[in-house]
Amino acid sequence: MTLKIKSIHKNFGGIKALDKCSLEIKKGKITAIIGPNGSGKTTLFNVISNIIKKDKGKTYFDGKDIARLEDFQISRLGISRTFQEVRLFRNLMIKDHLEIALSDSDEKLMQNLFKKKKYDVKKIKGILNLVGLNKSLDTFATDLSYGQRKLLDLAVAIAKPHTLLLLDEPVAGVNPMLRKDIKKILRELNKRGETILLIEHDMNFVMDLAEQIFVMDYGRIIAEGKPKAIQNNPKVLEAYLGD
Amino acid sequence: MIWPYLTHLLILIGIYVILTVSLNLALGYTGLLNLGHVAFFGIGAYTSALLTKAGVPFLLAFIIAGIFASIFGYLLVLATRKLKGDYLALATLGFSFVIYSLMLNWTGLTRGPLGIPGIEKPSFFGLTISSTYSYLIFVAVICILSVFVIYRIVKSPFGRLLEATRDDEMGLRVLGKNTFKLKYKAMMISAFFAGIAGSLFAHYITYIDPSYFTIPEIILLLSIVIVGGIASIKGSIVSTFVILLIPEALRFLALSSSILGPARQVIYAMILLGILLLRPRGIFGRVDLE
Ligand SMILES: Nc1ncnc2c1ncn2[C@@H]1O[C@H](COP(=O)(O)OP(=O)(O)O)[C@@H](O)[C@H]1O
Ligand SMILES: [Mg+2]
């Protein structure tokens, strides 16, 4: 698995959300994108999954140009992602979320017309255990607290068959205890061989988590490197202090 | 006196149950704010009436009525694929108008406002359904079959994807599901059943004209679905009975017909308002649309 992005440009009206943005991530590692609010991090994810059409530039996944694929086709290639705002199916239960995520295709109408919903309870429980969400499988998404919804969102992204996990601010708005738990989860996933690209606003959160960090400001990558080097990079400090 | 009248009411209710349950499949389960359902009903009615007049056997015309409405369902989703919510509702309302104008102005085919009289009673396998009682049995069989099929669809893994599409289409797409496909399939099934309901209607009253397929009809169908509950089949069925029967009770109050019409509208409005205030999710609804 490799993800490579070359010279992406994206304007919203007069705003340069992405400005000649390039990056490449390595298999089996946790890579982080940090940067002040509005620096274009989320837009970069949306361009990768083709939810937003870029103006210029290239996106490659496994050496394949994915620019012309639709968002759901890109997902099927093995890119699983979360959104900054938790996206759940409010009227569905926890088990339905995971069951939907576990299969990678559309359920065929005719083959399913007279089938009941089945659940791979063992697999579902395994994933819920991993993220530490101890709720009944029959709980509706609307009945979960914010933190629980954040965990279910993460569980869904993990359940979906993938080789690359894109996480947009997995700990945004989460209490300090849960932050630590989620950090543990991400480490555990990485130990199991997952490749993770995560967006985080807070520099400190990724310092002891990511192996490689990209720093964005005004749609540009202004620095990249190991956490230590990033921490002492004057350009980075300026971007954050200027925030 | 009361029995033929009751039979007549039950036939209409049977047809409306097919209409509202199928509308709920698109609107309630899939989240497609469709104001074009009445157009599918009309397409089915006209298709079946015109085909049988041209000598096509009833059963074939009945099926083609569904398939033809279904094709329009596909085209409607294709044409509105970028639209959501209010915009989708407006576009589908426009679709209703287009179909209505076609019925009204394509006089060579539809005879326009004169309508199509003398539509034959259904006959198949050598038997003709001529009495009201036998028509009720026929409608009941089709109605139960239709509800059963739609019930199985919404309870299946496919139905779960429809509900997920309604709740968060983007969230489902990034899980690798082609929501456009899901939406047009749901709409095609929904339209199919509206189409066969149209056929049942046309061959029952034996005369149709464009005025049966207009705005008041759209409002009636929507009210029934909302009162019964979004994404509740049981709700749509119960609500169809309630909404179609309550105004009928007025008839026994010996009101003059000039009061009866407006009184019916007032009662519908009051039921709808009461439900929206007291039980915003409808009688049996559990789902809320964002
Ligand atoms: N859909 C959009 N329409 C218009 N402007 C947008 C849109 N999405 C993002 N932007 C703008 O692009 C810039 C980058 O936003 P975003 O990628 O969300 O930043 P970040 O995730 O780093 O906080 C911001 O100025 C934001 O207002
Ligand atoms: Mg963001």
Image: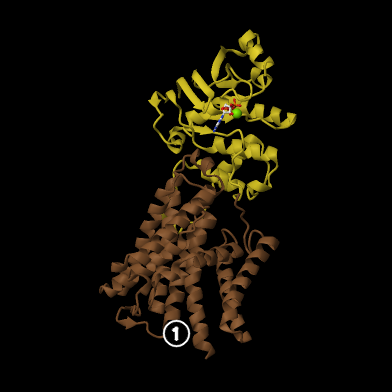
Chain colours: A yellow, B brown
Query: Viewer-proximal residue, B287 or A2?
Result: B287
Query: In which quadrant of this rendering is ligand 1 seen?
Result: top right
Name the residue located 45 percent from the left edge and 49 percent from the top edge: B182
Q: Quadrant of residue B229?
A: bottom right
Q: How far across and down, in percent of the image, does residue B72 sit?
A: 38, 57
Q: How far across and down, in percent of the image, does residue B14 sit?
A: 49, 74
Name the residue located 55 percent from the left edge and 69 percent from the top edge: B237
Name the residue located 56 percent from the left edge and 74 percent from the top edge: B244
Question: Disc 1 designates what residue?
Answer: B133
Label 1 CB less than 8 angstroms from ligand 1: no
Q: Quadrant of residue B251?
A: bottom right
Which residue lies most toward the left here? B55
The kind of residue tagged 1 is Tyr
Element at label 1: helix
Name the residue located 51 percent from the left edge and 49 percent from the top edge: B87
Q: In this view, does A91 lie above or below A83?
A: below
